[in-house]
Image: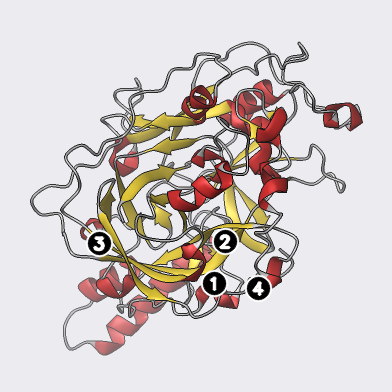
């Protein structure tokens, strides 16, 4: 098998970005799901809640791309001077002539006026968001995604104002910052190995140690106590944020349940075979991070994959990201695929140099991915698709409800973690760039462990 696609979603729920090469770390592809949109719209308790395609299909009207800050006309930023540029594409008119309402879909008429969404009919200038903003001055906000809470940070205006103008109601953009969400399902974490922690001193401890004269333990003790007391006082006054302790188990950002989602083209062909001749279901509807062709594997063989090994350094010379997609308003399946994805620009692509490691990368596949109504979304109208493409979930459910832990939802794809025994480090640590693991489209992939039975979903209440 080979890797045939790599995708990243900096702002959760928006269209993905196709990449020729991706940097992998314990929390997923670099930049993946760092931001999330929240709103009180359609919230029964009138509290801020996540925006996802299943409940807010209008999110499909936004594309994103990663560029250099300087190229985008921005002042230099941190994390490699990268920004994500978000584009809003006003909804097309559906087959019934109404903008943003797909022909043949009567669900819109069932929505109460208070919950009805009328997207902006006009184009808005692109929004540029720093990919690693300084959150020291941002307002903290507790976020709960699928029962796994984390501390996030409100980006505030102009970001909130831009999204709110496009959606037509109040929207909040949240950055994950130093927040860490626990992986709740035991099956998801089964077999995931974490590297041994290194004992590191804080800057205060290092400074105190450097300032203390040799052979003067009393002075060192007093100085350490004074420095610690000062730092504690600053934290209490809100002038210094408390550093969150990293858990001794896998954790994630705003990804749903795991750092990676792996899918296979061999099984996608089975999904398209459920449609009429000439109707193909595009892979972007399943929102994967890593796509493999499934060559030599049977359809749905991935249900039993326990480990994949990616061999680097031999990517095909022909492998590259697609050219920049046209935003034409054709109704064909192929044009919809172009609408759904933004290709990686030259600034986004990561080209391995001579020092880039080329050893194998192991992915631990620990659980099935249960699918939802996001499969039915038309990315050009931001509503349920007309015709057969609006019935993908229903047709998949006929014989793909194979996980007793999520018996009402069909399965497509596998959640995965990066095996860190090879020395991979966090992508968000400034001094650990040497720990970045890169894979590319065209890399060879082998199934190095198969499970005797399908895994069973056990994330609580999901």
Quadrant of the image containing the C terminus: bottom right
Q: Is residue 355 left or right of residue 303?
A: left
> Does the CB distance between marks 1 and 2 fall below 8 Å?
yes
Q: CA distance from mark 1 to mark 3?
A: 24 Å
**Up/down of 299 relative to 10, above or below:** below
Report which residue position mark 4 lands on: 458
**Up/down of 223 relative to 292, above or below:** below
Report which residue position mark 1 lands on: 188
Q: Is residue 431 left or right of residue 276?
A: left
Between circles 1 and 3, the one closer to the viewer is 1
Q: Earlier in the sequence, mark 2 or mark 4?
A: 2
Is residue 27 visible in the rendered image? The answer is yes
Most distant residue in the front direction: 277
Which label belongs to residue 257? Answer: 2
Between circles 2 and 4, the one closer to the viewer is 4
Report which residue position mark 3 lands on: 435
Dot 4 falls on a residue whose secondary structure is loop
Most distant residue in the left direction: 354
> Does the CB distance between marks 3 and 4 fall below 8 Å?
no
Q: CA distance from mark 1 to mark 4?
A: 8 Å
Q: Nearer the viewer, residue 410 or 60?
A: 410
Q: Nearer the viewer, residue 190 or 155?
A: 190
Dot 3 falls on a residue whose secondary structure is helix
**Residue 300, x across and y down, in percent:** 51, 60
**Residue 432, x across and y down, in percent:** 26, 60
Q: Earlier in the sequence, mark 2 or mark 3?
A: 2
Q: CA distance from mark 2 to mark 3?
A: 23 Å
Residue displayed at 82% across by 44% down: 43
Q: Is residue 355 left or right of residue 28?
A: left
Residue displayed at 50% across by 22% down: 335
**Up/down of 451 relative to 268, above or below:** below
């Amino acid at each position: 098998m080979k890797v045939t696609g790599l995708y990243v979603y900096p702002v959760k729920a928006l269209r993905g970005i196709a990449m020729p090469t991706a940097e992998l770390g314990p929390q997923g592809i670099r930049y993946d799901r760092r931001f999330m949109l929240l709103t009180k719209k359609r919230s029964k308790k009138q509290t801020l809640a996540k925006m996802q395609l299943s409940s807010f299909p209008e999110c499909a009207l936004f594309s994103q791309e990663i560029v250099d800050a300087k190229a985008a006309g921005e002042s230099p930023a941190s994390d490699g001077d990268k920004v994500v540029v978000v584009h809003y594409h006003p909804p097309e008119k559906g087959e019934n002539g109404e903008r943003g309402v797909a022909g043949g879909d009567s669900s819109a008429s069932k929505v109460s006026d208070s919950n009805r969404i009328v997207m902006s009919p006009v184009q808005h200038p692109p929004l540029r968001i720093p990919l690693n903003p300084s959150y020291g001055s941002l307002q903290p906000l507790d976020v709960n995604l699928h029962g796994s809470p984390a501390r996030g940070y409100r980006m505030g205006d102009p970001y909130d104002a831009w999204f709110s103008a496009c959606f037509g109601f109040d929207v909040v953009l949240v950055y994950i910052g130093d927040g860490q969400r626990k992986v709740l399902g035991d099956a998801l974490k089964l077999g995931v190995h974490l590297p041994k922690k290194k004992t590191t001193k804080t800057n205060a401890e290092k400074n105190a140690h450097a300032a203390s004269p040799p052979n003067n333990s009393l002075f060192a003790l007093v100085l350490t106590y004074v420095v610690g007391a000062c730092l504690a006082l600053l934290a209490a006054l809100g002038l210094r944020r408390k550093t969150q302790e990293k858990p001794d188990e896998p954790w994630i950002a705003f990804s749903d349940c795991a750092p990676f989602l792996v899918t296979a083209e061999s099984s996608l062909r089975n999904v398209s075979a459920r449609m009429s001749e000439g109707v193909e279901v595009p892979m972007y509807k399943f929102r994967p991070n890593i796509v493999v062709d499934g060559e030599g594997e049977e359809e749905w063989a991935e249900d039993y994959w326990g480990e994949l090994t990616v061999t680097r350094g031999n990517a095909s010379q022909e492998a590259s990201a697609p050219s920049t997609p046209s935003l034409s308003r054709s109704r064909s399946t192929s044009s919809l695929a172009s609408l759904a994805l933004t290709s990686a620009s030259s600034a986004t692509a990561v080209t391995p140099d001579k020092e880039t490691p080329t050893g194998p990368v192991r992915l631990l596949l620990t659980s099935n991915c249960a699918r939802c109504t996001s499969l039915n979304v038309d990315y050009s109208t931001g509503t349920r698709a007309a015709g057969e493409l609006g019935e993908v979930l229903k047709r998949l459910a006929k014989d793909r409800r194979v996980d007793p832990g999520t018996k009402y939802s069909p399965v497509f794809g596998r959640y995965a973690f990066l095996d860190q025994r090879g020395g991979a480090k966090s992508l968000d640590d400034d001094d650990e760039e040497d720990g970045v693991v890169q894979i590319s489209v065209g890399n060879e992939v082998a199934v190095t462990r198969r499970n005797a039975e399908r895994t069973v979903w056990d994330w609580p209440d999901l």
